[in-house]
């Protein structure tokens, strides 16, 4: 199905960092990501943020639909070498994400 791993208190300004969030390819487009984000956001307080590679347009579309704000763009080291552009998405109050995924 999928999994989510978050680091509470990872950033003084943005709060908890969603460090790993993956949905099995066969489950994409079936609401699995929304369910995982709902379960996660229901257990947190404060803000939540994550970094997503710019080329991951499907994930970015999901975060946009769920009210995530594109906060900043940065160049990241890519797995296997090279550089990729990434966006920091944030929900200043995780309750907004919880409601958006209900």
Image (cartoon, rainbow, N blue to C red):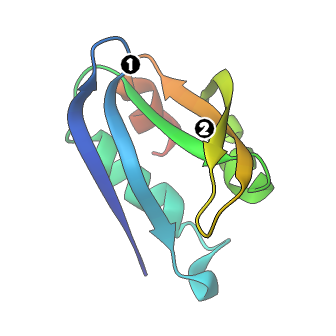
Camera-nearest residue between 40 and 4 = 4
Crowd tier of the residue under label 2, counting other residues whose Cα lies within 10 Å: few below 14, some 14–19, many 20 or above: some
Quarter of image, res 44: top left
Instruction: Report the Cα–Cα distance between label 1 and label 2.
Output: 17 Å
User: Dot 1, crowdedness within 10 Å: few (<14), some or many (≥20)?
Assistant: some
* Depicted 54 relative to depicted 68: above or below: below
Query: Which of the two marks, 1 or 2, is nearer to us in this view?
Result: 1
Q: In this view, does 28 lie above or below 102?
A: below
Q: Mark 2 points at which residue?
A: 66
Which structural element holds mark 2? loop
In the image, taking residue 95 as reference, residue 33 lies left or right, namely right
Is 18 in front, or is 80? 80
Task: Look at the image and tell me in which quarter the N terminus lies.
Answer: bottom left
Identify the secondary structure beneath mark 1.
Answer: loop
Residue 26: image x %, image y %? Answer: 61, 88
Lower position in the chain sequence, tag 1 or tag 2? 1
> Mark 1 — residue?
14
Give the percent coordinates (x, y) of residue 30.
61, 74
Q: Nearer the viewer, residue 67 or 86?
A: 86
Q: Residue at x 65, y 21 (%)?
A: 72
Residue 58, image quadrant: bottom right
Q: In this view, does 42 lie to the left or right of 67?
A: left
Q: Which residue is drawn at 67% across and 30% down?
A: 74
Compared to 76, does 30 lie above or below?
A: below
């Amino acid at each position: 199905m999928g999994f989510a791993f978050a680091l509470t208190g990872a950033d003084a300004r943005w709060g908890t960092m969603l460090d790993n969030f993956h949905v099995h390819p066969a489950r994409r487009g079936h609401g699995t990501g929304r369910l995982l984000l709902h379960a996660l956001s229901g257990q947190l307080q404060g803000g939540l943020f994550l970094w997503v590679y710019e080329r991951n347009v499907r994930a970015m579309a999901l975060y946009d639909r769920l009210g995530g704000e594109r906060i900043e763009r940065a160049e990241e080291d890519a797995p296997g070498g090279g550089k990729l552009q990434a966006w920091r998405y944030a929900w200043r109050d995780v309750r907004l994400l919880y409601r958006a995924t209900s």
